[in-house]
C-alpha cells in the first residue's frame, strides 16, 4: 500500500498539520518506507509459532529478578504535611473544583 501526495494532504488536513511541500514529500517517503517494513513483517510465516506471554525467556527472567519491594526511606508523612493548609486523617484536603 503506497501513499500518494494526495493521501498525505488528506492525512495532514485531518490531523490539522500545516505541512510545507518539502515536509509533505519527506513524510510521504517515510510513511511508505514504514508500510514497506510492515508488509515484510506480515509476509513472514508465523503458523505454528506460539505467542510469548513475556518477551523474556522464563529461565532468563528468573536470573533477572527485580529487587525485593521494601521501603528504602522512612515514612515522613507528618513532616511533609506540616506546611499543608489542610490535612485530615493523613490526607491533603483540597478545595472542591467540580460540582
Image (cartoon, rainbow, N blue to C red):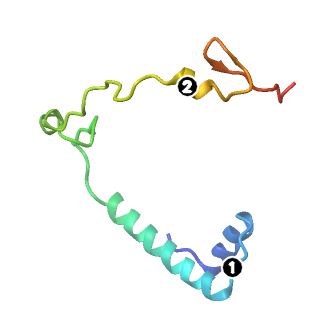
Instruction: Residue at 26% x, 26% y: name it.
Output: 68
Secondary structure type for disc 2: helix
Left or right, 25 with respect to 37, comes to right
Q: Residue 16 at x, y = what percent?
A: 74, 67
Q: Badge 1 is on which residue? A: 19
Left or right, 18 with respect to 49, comes to right
Q: Nearer the viewer, residue 45 or 90?
A: 90
Secondary structure type for disc 1: loop
Q: Nearer the viewer, residue 22 or 70?
A: 70
Q: Residue 1 at x, y = what percent?
A: 50, 69
The Cα atoms of the two marked residues, 2 and 1, are separated by: 53 Å
- Mark 1 is surrounded, within 10 Å at the Cα level, by few (under 14), some (14 to 19) or many (20 or more) other residues, namely some
Residue farthest along the bottom direction in this orientation: 22
Q: Nearer the viewer, residue 69 or 16?
A: 69
The mark closer to the camera, 2 or 1, is 2
Assign the C terminus to one quadrant of the image: top right
Q: Badge 2 is on which residue? A: 79
Amino acid at each position: 500500500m503506497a501513499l500518494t501526495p494526495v493521501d498525505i494532504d488528506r492525512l495532514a488536513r485531518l490531523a490539522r498539520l500545516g505541512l510545507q511541500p518539502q515536509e509533505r514529500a519527506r513524510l510521504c517517503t517515510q510513511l511508505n518506507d514504514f508500510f514497506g517494513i510492515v508488509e515484510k513483517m506480515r509476509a513472514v510465516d508465523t503458523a505454528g509459532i506460539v505467542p510469548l506471554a513475556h518477551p523474556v525467556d522464563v529461565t532468563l527472567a528468573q536470573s533477572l529478578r527485580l529487587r525485593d519491594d521494601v521501603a528504602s526511606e522512612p515514612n515522613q508523612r507528618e513532616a511533609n504535611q506540616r506546611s499543608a493548609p489542610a490535612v485530615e486523617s493523613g490526607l491533603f484536603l483540597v478545595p472542591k473544583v467540580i460540582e
